[in-house]
Amino acid sequence: MKRHRSINLTDFLTSVIAAAIGFSDSFIHVAIDSILVCVSSNKRSGRGGSYGKLVPLRFINGQEFIQHNRRMYTIPRVYHNDARILYLIYFYIPRFLDLPAGEKLHVIFHELYHIDPTFNGDIRRMGAVKSAHGFSKKHFDSLFQREAGRFQESIAHTEMHSILSLDSRGLYAAYETVVARRMKVPKPVMIDKIS
């Protein structure tokens, strides 16, 4: 089998996300230039555990500042290609890579569906108590499941799907070099102490 020279995994996943945004009416509010894709490592592969996560870079309702215990906090700004980033999406490797293509797409759609419909840097809040998924993660997943399946059908005979179908061993066998963006999750920082 002929090996390709290299693949930038985070650039490839960004292109998949951009295609999903263009395909799905559920993501019409999402601007790809304000999303940065990164990877983080799992200690072990296998089933269970997290495959990805969305990190919002603003607080509730898109606020840039929040007061807590008489202190004011903000999240450091992140820029990429001169665009301000509002969301980071992390994929955990090799666990994410070892999913079948359809399940990889499910993870991508799941993380995108967490984005607030106003694209304000906050998450989509599904309930007062369990804000991320609401009363049921299964119900949350049902909100985008059909579109994720239709998207997979639309790319089924493309190179994109062929790459998504590779597991971690297959990816490293197919490419001489695999690179990806890694970045620490930005943490809120205190900017003022209120007396």
Image: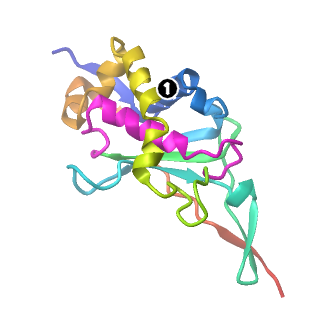
Q: Is residue 118 above or below residue 22?
A: below
Q: Residue at x 37, y 17 (%)?
A: 153
Location of the N terminus (image quadrant):
top left
Q: Residue at x 19, y 28 (%)?
A: 173
Q: Position of residue 11 (x, y in %)?
A: 47, 30
Using the image as rendered, state which of residue 81 and residue 74 is in the foreground.
74
Q: Which secondary structure, mark 1? A: helix
Using the image as rendered, state which of residue 77 and residue 150 is in the foreground.
150
Q: In the current view of this chain or complex, which residue is farthest to the bottom?
A: 195
Q: Total marks drawn?
A: 1
Q: Residue at x 32, y 27 (%)?
A: 164
Q: Position of residue 32 (x, y in %)?
A: 61, 32
Location of the C terminus (image quadrant):
bottom right
Q: Is residue 180 visible?
A: no
Locate residue 180: give its quadrant: top left
**Mark 1 lies on residue:** 15
Q: Residue at x 22, y 50 (%)?
A: 47
Q: State yes or no: residue 103 in magenta.
A: yes
What amino acid type is highlighted by mark number 1?
Ser
Q: Position of residue 17 (x, y in %)?
A: 50, 30
Using the image as rendered, state which of residue 103 and residue 19 is in the foreground.
103
Q: Is residue 94 above or below residue 60?
A: above
Q: In the current view of this chain or complex, which residue is farthest to the right?
A: 195
